[in-house]
Amino acid sequence: MLILHETHTVAGRHEDAFDTCLRDEWLPGVASIDGARLLAVLKQAHGSGPSYQVITLTLLRDASSYGALAAAVDGGSLHGLTLALDDLRHDVVGKLLLPLPWSPVQEVELEAVPTEPARHSPSLFMEDTVHPHEGLLERYVEESGSHYAAEMAQRQREKAALLTVEAAFRTAAGSGRRREIVLWQRIVRPDRLEMLLRSEVPERFRRPGTWMHDALALRDQWESRLLRTVSWSPLY
């Protein structure tokens, strides 16, 4: 399984037209490619970063499916539609992702992904992009599973979790920055977001033995984005 992660910087005046084009034309267009499905569509919440950011996740069965999708975009069946989307956005940046060994999601059944617009209430996700220190990528992959994922699971059992880890990825070879980890986390207690924004992380979560503290040996900076699924996103 591969995930094509794309961030679209949409022209603000074309926001609704871009959404409609994704829903009515891009969704079935991607499904026409063997081994490909549009998996999820999300918007970055206004006030949490750059404006008019749309994130799409495309499920690919394997590398050959990515090749077929790329060929369709570059001069095949999706070329004209791609040009139409280009007229509605300023830029798009993509990267291929592979699930980490400890990711809760290892495979998604391609045939189970809807090829028609869904209808549901929005879900909130926090996407963390982490860049481990030089030479520590593999150690970060291992310890994030044995430490961070285990810590979050314990909080969930105690019903104290703000979010749950839904999936974890690394960039595929030759795609994006090599030292990049992407965590997908569903916000299960949105009422606690205000507390996160208004106050510092409590000291008990920053002591030695906690991931917030111990991970400083493996990484320093990371980027968080607050994302909301659109109402028709196949996966929500």
Image (tube, rainbow, N blue to C red):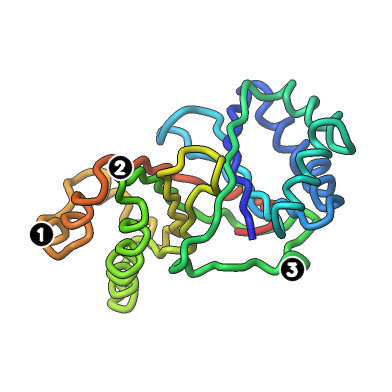
The residue at 80%/31% (across/down) is 74
Q: Quadrant of the N terminus?
A: bottom right
The residue at 68%/55% (across/down) is 59
Label 1's element? loop
Q: Is residue 220 above or below residue 87?
A: below
Report whether 37 appears left or right of 177. Answer: right
Q: Residues within 10 Å of mark 2 (few under 14, many from 20)?
A: few
Q: Which residue is mark 2?
A: 134
- As rendered, which of 26 and 160 lies closer to the eye? 26
Marks 3 and 2, how far apart in space? 39 Å
Query: In front: mark 3 or mark 2?
Result: 2
> What amino acid is found at the position of numbered circle 2 in the picture?
Glu
- As rendered, which of 163 and 207 lies closer to the eye? 207
Q: Which x, y percent locates residue 72?
A: 83, 39
Q: Which x, y percent locates residue 80?
A: 86, 29
Q: Which residue is mark 3?
A: 112
Query: In front: mark 2 or mark 1?
Result: 2
Report whether 69 appears left or right of 7. Answer: right
Q: Which x, y percent locates residue 139?
A: 31, 58
